[in-house]
Amino acid sequence: MKNSRRKIAALIICLVAVVAIVSGSLAWYSSTNSVTQYASLAGFTTKAYVYRINDEGKEVSLSGDEKGLYTMSSNPEDDNFIGNLKIKVIHRGYANSYVRVKMSIQWTMPDGTVTQNVVMPFEFAEKWYDNRENDYCVYYTEDTGLFESYDKSIITGFDVDEFNEKTMTRNAVAKVAVVVEAVQVNRYQQIWGIEALPWK
């Protein structure tokens, strides 16, 4: 009987810790110092692999700074040009779940002014719904019981012409936060705080 009570108590402590981690990561993301978070919820793990494709067509992993932010350039001639950004979702677990990717981009201009959360003209793969104009998120439109990892980038293209029409200069520097979040299919309202899935 005592063992059963200890197991129940341990389970409650674990659940409280998970809720605290998730709440903390969401609050952290809404700040300007958002970082990539590993989510561990109800038996599944979700994270992002952030990279670029080099001139030889090979993947080059990108490293975030001490805050987990990726520095990107506004100059198309640079290796770390924002249009070269690629993201894979690695999702493993046993519970059917929904996945979304948050992309927060903060630009610093040469004069030091900062532009928050600019929506860049990325194009996304099939089954990924772009809702960034509303919440900076891209959603996978099926439950993820069907894969352990998404083995191609969710980003399929970048409209350079549209980008050039914006007010960015070639000397502007971007700090990019990428956060992948997963939630059980019956918990998205509670944990994500939305009434309905955007693509529906």
Image (tube, helix red, strand yellow):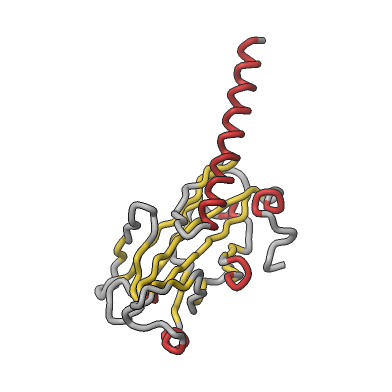
Q: Which residue lies furthest to the left in this view?
A: 56
Q: How many labels does the image show?
A: 0
Q: Residue furthest top?
A: 1
Against 165, residue 179 (above or below) is: above
**Left or right of residue 171, residue 41 in this image:** right
**Residue at image location 39% in from the left, 66% down from the top:** 175
Q: In the image shown, does 170 or 1 lie closer to the viewer?
A: 170
Against 86, residue 39 (above or below) is: above
* Residue 50, image quadrant: bottom left
**Residue at image location 50% in from the left, 50% down from the top:** 46
**Left or right of residue 24, residue 8 in this image:** right
Is residue 150 something one can see in this rendering? no
**Residue at image location 47% in from the left, 54% down from the top:** 149
Against 183, residue 89 (above or below) is: below
**Residue at image location 72% in from the left, 67% down from the top:** 200
Q: Image quadrant for the N terminus? A: top right
In x, y percent, where is residue 23?
Answer: 59, 46
* Residue 174, image quadrant: bottom left
Is residue 102 something one can see in this rendering? yes
* Residue 164, image quadrant: bottom left
In x, y percent, where is residue 134?
Answer: 63, 70
Against 167, residue 10 (above or below) is: above
In x, y percent, where is residue 115?
Answer: 47, 73
Q: In the image shown, does 159 or 19 lie closer to the viewer?
A: 19
In x, y percent, where is residue 142?
Answer: 63, 60
